[in-house]
Image (tube, helix red, strand yellow):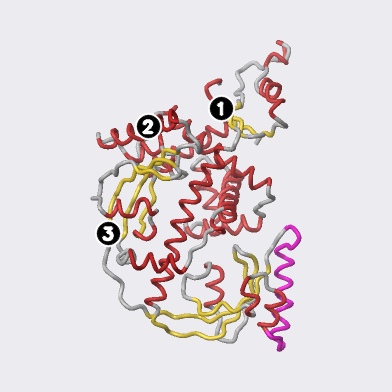
């Protein structure tokens, strides 16, 4: 990444980007040397030709693996550049607010990627090299993905609130939303800027209408999504995968239910812009019966890491607390004093926990404990935990699970809609100067 000090200096910096006149003729190389030119300025940073080319090639490989026809090169290049601009705006905000991803977290994430693909670290490196991706570049990309996920969690997801009244209303008006019916959906978003003029709105609507016409004429949805969609998943063909109706955005849910596989919707409007949805497939629909499930009554103590508290510090502190508990110390009292979780006031009591209620790292450690046992320090995305299992039971959780599913569905819907709106606002207030056409 090339950083530039301020906008008044742009002319000078950009003028030096490929300045052969600064060198005497006799010093010129005997063969052409590729110059890494600037294709966009994002606030106080630049995006270069080599960065853009690498991401274009990566996106092309992904579409090829999916069997999606590639868009025209110039259209696709601009789509990729816009994604880079949006990513850069997000990473800049993360840096400004001191949000970071440490090497230990990155290494664990890469380890899970290798494990999920049933590869050793050596095999993972070889597979990446075969795809033309260097190990350092791969680490940078994964670090960026984790960073952007954490930024979304902090700026959007953490502010989503679902009330009991909303849950009751959802269950009353969506009796079959949790029936098990699933939809494979793809979508295209044409983003409309906040405060767009009438001309801008007309241009965006014309763009969406043109896409719908081309879709109904038989053009490939994935190719058009990669060409025209402003959604983060546009470059992968706009595929949202399989989702229950409860997990679809509110705007899509009722429309998709009335569609047939292969059908394309009319243009739908939201605060984020204009949406076009395709129903690829649907399946299921049988209502679930009574559910007997094992529940675990657990407590925990959470130590969060920070610039002041390292992983080693947190682990060491929890080991000390565990030793005190094993020697007769009261877990609940120590949780009240030491835990950084909201449950600290209740002695770290999490109540009855169902499978899937906690992150995998926590759940795996908890499931390995017998009632009365205390775990060794456990690392999760939230920090370091000490876990105690009080007891276990089998419980009919049909109604409870319905409420939990409704809560999760509402939270996911709200979060997706809020994230689209947050991205639009971030993009609108970001200074961007395109220089692609000046190459």
Q: Per the image, is 96 magenta?
A: no
Range covered by the magenta-colored residues: 307-330
Residue at point 48% right, 64% down? 162
Total of numbered circles in the picture? 3
What is the crowding at mark 3: few (fewer than 14 residues within 10 Å), some, or many (at least 20)? few
Q: Nearer the viewer, mark 3 or mark 1?
A: 1
The residue pinned by badge 1 equals 434
Mark 2 is surrounded, within 10 Å at the Cα level, by few (under 14), some (14 to 19) or many (20 or more) other residues, namely: some
Q: Which residue position is annotated with label 3?
A: 283
Q: Earlier in the sequence, mark 3 or mark 2?
A: 2
Magenta stretch secondary structure, dominant: helix
Q: Which mark is residue 100?
A: none
User: What secondary structure is found at the residue carrying circle 3?
Assistant: strand
Q: Is residue 39 above or below residue 373?
A: above
Name the N-terminal-most of marks 3 and 1.
Answer: 3
With 151 as the anchor, is 275 left or right in this view?
Answer: left
x 65%, y 71%: residue: 302
Q: Earlier in the sequence, mark 1 or mark 2?
A: 2
């Amino acid at each position: 990444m090339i950083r530039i000090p301020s906008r008044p200096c742009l002319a000078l910096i950009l003028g030096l980007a490929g300045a052969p006149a600064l060198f005497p003729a006799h010093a010129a190389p005997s063969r052409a040397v590729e110059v890494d030119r600037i294709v966009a300025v994002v606030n106080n940073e630049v995006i270069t030709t080599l960065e853009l080319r690498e991401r274009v090639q990566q996106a092309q490989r992904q579409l090829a693996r999916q069997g999606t026809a590639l868009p025209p090169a110039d259209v696709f290049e601009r789509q990729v550049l816009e994604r880079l601009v949006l990513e850069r705006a997000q990473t800049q905000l993360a840096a400004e607010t001191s949000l970071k991803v440490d090497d230990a977290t990155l290494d664990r994430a890469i380890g899970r990627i290798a494990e999920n693909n049933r590869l050793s670290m050596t095999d993972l490196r070889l597979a990446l090299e075969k795809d033309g991706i260097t190990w350092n570049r791969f680490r940078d990309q994964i670090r960026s993905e984790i960073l952007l996920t954490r930024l979304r969690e902090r700026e959007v997801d953490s502010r989503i609130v679902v009330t009991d009244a909303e849950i009751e209303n959802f269950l009353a008006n969506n009796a079959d939303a949790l029936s098990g019916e699933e939809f494979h959906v793809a979508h295209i978003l044409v983003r409309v800027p906040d405060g767009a003029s009438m001309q801008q709105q007309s241009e965006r609507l014309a763009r969406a209408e043109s896409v719908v016409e081309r879709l109904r004429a038989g053009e490939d949805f994935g190719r058009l999504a990669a060409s025209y969609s402003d959604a983060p998943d546009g470059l992968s063909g706009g595929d949202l995968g399989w989702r229950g109706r409860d997990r679809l955005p509110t705007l899509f849910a009722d429309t998709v239910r009335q569609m047939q596989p292969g059908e394309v919707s009319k243009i739908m409007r939201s605060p984020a812009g204009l949406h076009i949805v395709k129903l690829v497939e649907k399946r299921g629909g049988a209502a679930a019966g009574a559910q007997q499930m094992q529940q675990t009554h657990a407590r925990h103590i959470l130590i969060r890491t920070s610039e002041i508290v390292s992983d080693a510090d947190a682990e060491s502190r929890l080991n000390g607390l565990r030793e005190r508990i094993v020697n007769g110390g009261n877990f609940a009292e120590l949780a009240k004093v030491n835990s950084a979780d909201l449950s600290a006031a209740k002695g770290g009591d999490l109540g009855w926990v169902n499978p899937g209620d906690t992150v995998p790292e926590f759940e795996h450690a908890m499931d390995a404990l017998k009632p009365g046992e205390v775990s060794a320090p456990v690392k999760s995305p939230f920090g370091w935990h000490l876990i105690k299992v009080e007891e276990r039971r089998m419980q009919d959780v049909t109604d409870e699970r319905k409420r939990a599913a409704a809560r999760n569905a509402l939270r996911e819907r709200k979060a997706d809609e809020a994230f689209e709106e947050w991205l639009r606002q971030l993009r609108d207030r970001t200074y961007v100067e395109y220089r692609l056409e000046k190459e």
